[in-house]
Image: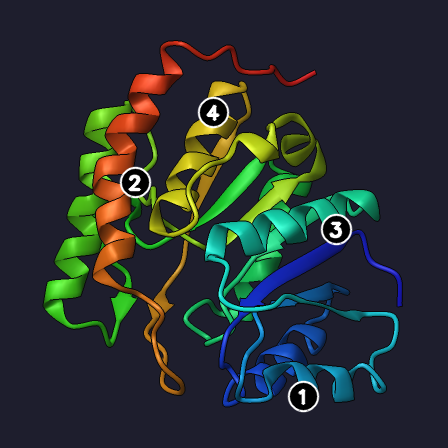
Amino acid sequence: MKSDAVVIIPTYNEKENIEAIIRAVFGLPQAFHILIVDDGSPDGTAAIVKSLQQEFPEELHIVERTGKLGLGTAYICGFKWAIERKYDYIFEMDADFSHNPKDLLRLYKACSEEGADAAIGSRYINRLVNVVNWPIGRVLMSYYASAYVRFITGLRIFDTTAGFMCYRREVLETIELDKIRFKGYAFQIEMKFTATKCGFVVKEVPIVFTNRELGTSKMSGGIFSEAVIGVIQLKWSSFFRKYPKKS
């Protein structure tokens, strides 16, 4: 089945979730394709995906990489793959159901009908916190991390670290992807910051974020530290960089 949209899902050891998330996306009333970018999962995640490709030969794709190379590089790899194949709408989504697949429809609508160049599945829009099953410490860390990012960068986005996104292809074609430098938590911040610097309209769509029930979180202190220091570096370097502008 043809589609103008592809959902990029990076994976590392997601065997408990991968088949269910794929079937949930393909069960939506609108057609989406899926690209799995797997970083050499030793638990057999890639094998599960490849077995499902027999059932979904045109809709399900996989890129296998050797070793954990970082979330940011996985998405950059997926973006380039999707641009080459001329998808009009390119999504980021986690494999663990923390992002509700049904919300793909709302992000798609924001970009296809409501004038957004990029849409964020936002946990913190209008100062409300829409997070389920997170420890309060992690909620506060994430919420105030976004506040810190807004203060340093001047971004008018509440959920600056969100990882549930839809981009129109033009955004990713304009952003100089090879100049995106961060690999972890700060990657999401850098992408949003760069998109706005290029003149694109970024819209937040409220979602409810639900902490994973199966598998293991990939969050670490090092990833968070990268964001804290990286935001200052990002803002400072922006004073000396000329950003390409939307056509």
Residue extending farthest front: 66
What's the residue at 56%, 38% (across, down)? 118
Secondary structure at badge 3 equals helix
Sort mark 4 into few (<14), some (14-19) or many (20+) by Cα contacts within 10 Å: many
The disc at residue 196 is 4
Cα–Cα gap, marks 2 and 3: 29 Å
| Mark closest to the chain's N terminus, 4 or 3 | 3
Q: Tell me if residue 118 comes above or below residue 56 in the rendering.
A: above
| Amino acid at the residue labelled 4 | Thr
| Mark closest to the chain's N terminus, 4 or 1 | 1
- Residue pointed to by mark 3: 81
Its colouring scheme is: rainbow
Residue 100 x/y as whole percent: 49, 70
Q: Tell us which disc is closer to us: 4 or 3.
A: 3
| Amino acid at the residue labelled 3 | Trp
Seen from the viewer's position, the closer of residues 77 and 161 is: 77
- Residue pointed to by mark 1: 48
| Mark closest to the chain's N terminus, 1 or 3 | 1
